[in-house]
Image (spheres, helix red, strand yellow):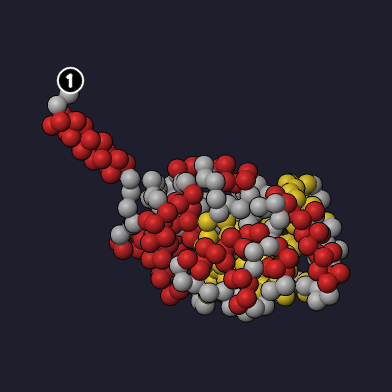
């Protein structure tokens, strides 16, 4: 029969093994190295085995550096809001990152296909915050009452590390959800009438988001309900997640809702057009890669 001493040794060994398999918040030097590699568009060292606390710590350090180089904070992005994308990163909940002024381009922008170390593109959408009361919203209808614009958006994330397949959910959070660039189209005002808001709520849930190339060939499609059953549920989640870290959304902040499509790699010569069928006032948004 094992002695108490033997059992204690086994338990200690188990704890040490678990600790060795668990990474910690990246050091200041590691974060600086990541940021330098990202700026140079070269793959950074892999980030593995972070937990949520370590991811939040790493993200905070990274965003101190981003704030020096990328301009003012203009909003936040919710990531992994689509179950298909969650599956890719073996995670079951959203994550968030920060958006900066110099990340945002206008529709029609021409972007280097190698805009990052591990560049991708996806169909997305931005909403603009109207009131700080958005933190009280618990339903899509309550969110809609506290935003004033919908904006077509193609996000251009960069997974940045040597082996993106090794990133889990906290790893994605640690790299600021890969925020790199994004192309925004013309905003659509949110209706102020009850009937208009009811129509927009249904349209957002039921819309078909279509991504095509410049010749009209379909690249991918998605539905509004692919994001947390209603895309404005991403705002409910994000407002709560930010509040836990003492961050308050304010009027004018932009929120990226997440991906309505698979994440696809760009290539030189490709033009991408994203349209929102079922939202007739929403004009397509376009980006071209060189």
Mark 1 residue crowding within 10 angstroms, few (<14) / some (14–19) / many (20+)? few
Residue beneath the point at 54% across and 46% down:
92
Residue beneath the point at 59% across and 71% down:
135
Residue beneath the point at 45% across and 52% down:
170
- Provide residue 38's location: percent of width, then percent of height: 45, 59
- Provide residue 43's location: percent of width, then percent of height: 44, 52
Q: Is residue 9 left or right of residue 247?
A: left
Q: Is residue 229 visible?
A: yes
Residue beneath the point at 17% across and 20% down:
1
Q: Is residue 262 above or below residue 144?
A: above
Which residue is outermost to the top?
1
- Provide residue 146's location: percent of width, then percent of height: 69, 74
Residue with the mark numbered 1? 1
- Provide residue 176's location: percent of width, then percent of height: 48, 60
Q: Is residue 68 left or right of residue 199?
A: left
Quadrant containing the C terminus is: bottom right
**Between 170 and 105, which is closer to the camera in this rendering?**
170
Q: Is residue 121 visible?
A: no
**Between 105 and 65, which is closer to the camera in this rendering?**
65
């Amino acid at each position: 029969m094992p002695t108490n001493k033997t059992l204690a040794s086994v338990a200690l060994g188990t704890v040490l093994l678990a600790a060795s398999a668990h990474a910690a918040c990246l050091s200041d030097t590691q974060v600086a190295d990541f940021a330098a590699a990202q700026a140079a568009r070269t793959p950074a060292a892999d980030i593995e085995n972070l937990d949520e606390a370590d991811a939040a710590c790493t993200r905070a350090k990274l965003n101190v550096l981003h704030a020096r180089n990328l301009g003012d904070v203009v909003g936040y992005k919710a990531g992994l809001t689509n179950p298909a994308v969650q599956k890719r990163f073996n995670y079951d909940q959203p994550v968030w990152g920060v958006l900066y002024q110099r990340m945002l381009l206008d529709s029609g922008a021409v972007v280097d296909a190698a805009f990052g170390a591990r560049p991708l593109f996806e169909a997305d959408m931005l909403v603009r915050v109207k009131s700080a009361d958005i933190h009280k919203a618990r339903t899509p209808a309550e969110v809609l009452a506290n935003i004033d614009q919908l904006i077509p958006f193609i996000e251009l994330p960069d997974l940045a590390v040597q082996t993106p397949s090794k990133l889990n959910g906290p790893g994605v959070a640690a790299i600021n959800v890969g925020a790199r660039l994004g192309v925004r189209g013309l905003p659509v005002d949110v209706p102020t009438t009850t009937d208009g808001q009811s129509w927009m709520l249904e349209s957002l849930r039921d819309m078909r988001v279509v991504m095509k190339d410049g010749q009209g060939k379909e690249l991918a499609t998605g539905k509004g309900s692919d994001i947390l059953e209603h895309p404005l549920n991403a705002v409910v989640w994000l407002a709560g997640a930010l509040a836990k870290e003492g961050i308050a959304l304010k009027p004018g902040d932009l929120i990226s809702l997440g991906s309505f499509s698979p994440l696809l790699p760009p290539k030189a010569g490709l033009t991408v057009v994203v349209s929102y069928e079922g939202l007739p006032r929403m004009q397509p948004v376009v980006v071209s890669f060189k």
